[in-house]
Image (cartoon, rainbow, N blue to C red):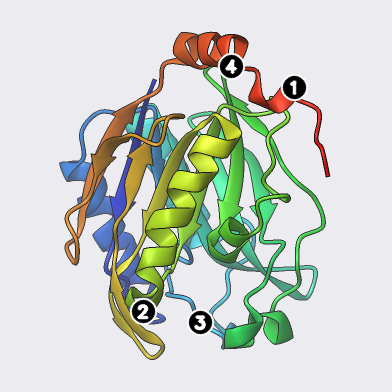
Amino acid sequence: MKITVLQQDIVWKNIPANLRHMGELLEKAPKSDIYLFPEMCSTGFCMQPQGIAEEPEGATVQRMCQWAVKYDAAIAGTVMTVDGGKYYNRMYFVTPDGVLGYYDKVHLFEYSGENLVYTPGEKRVIWEWRGIRIRPAICYDLRFPLFLHNDQGYDLLLISANFPESRILAWDTLVRARAIENQCYVAASNRVGVDEYGNYVGHSVVLSPYGEKLGGCRSKSQGSATGDIDQEMVEKMRKAFPLMQEKHVW
């Protein structure tokens, strides 16, 4: 299986422009089984969702469904969503057969006031696609290792983010740590560009369960990076080095 992260410069609160950019990135990307966009890929990480947030079957999800069919692949990314009168930072996982599932961000970023606007998710989610078990996470979730602890429940961690340049060292360190400690592949998509909160330099990456870089995007530039997922290797690794079966000593 191939997984591709898409590194995008997001136009602030402009859904049509962002959908055009997303389509262009997909056109240029190599053939893959999963494509992952950054956090709030159609609007930017915005704390003013009124009048902008989309219904669950809004324009962005509809376009993701079209792309999934066109490329015979799964399309994932987070969308500013209004559902039942509440706002969510929601990652959708769309396949050629439609929306396989969604995940609402659990750890809202209080520093930006996200918790004052959006409703937190209440559950962990696992999806299965083409034989691979997938765990979604969104940006700030990355900082909570116990939340992402893998009791052999998933093979691939998808992380969609808006991590700023000022904290890019933390990003680089944490995505690698999550891969190594959970013995899983990590696909992490982060935006580039500028918004009212700061600068973004990307560092989108695909990592092996050993923390090795299988593919990475060029800093500060739009583009894509692809890595291969070897499920047989993961199973052999976990059998030879049963880290997650070890008893915890406190």
Residue sitting at 64 percent across and 58 percent down? 56
Q: Quadrant of residue 238?
A: top right
Q: Which residue is mark 2?
A: 166
Task: Describe residue 153's horizontal placement relative to residue 234 as left or right.
Answer: right
> Looking at the image, is 230 positioned above or below residue 169?
above
User: Could you say which quadrant of the image residue 57 lies in?
Assistant: bottom right
Q: Are marks 2 and 1 in contact (CB under 8 Å)?
A: no
Residue shown at 72% from the left, 62% from the top: 106
Give how far across and how far down residue 15 sits, in percent.
39, 71
Rendered location of residue 151, percent (x, y):
73, 30
Q: Does residue 67 appear in this view?
A: yes
- The residue carrying mark 3 is 46
* Dot placed on the residue nearer the N-terminal end, 1 or 3: 3
4 and 2 marks in contact (CB < 8 Å): no
Structural crowding at the residue carrying mark 2, measured as other residues with C-alpha within 10 Å and reported as few (<14), some (14–19) or many (≥20): few
Compare marks 3 and 2 and give the one earlier in the sequence: 3
Q: Which mark is residue 245?
A: 1
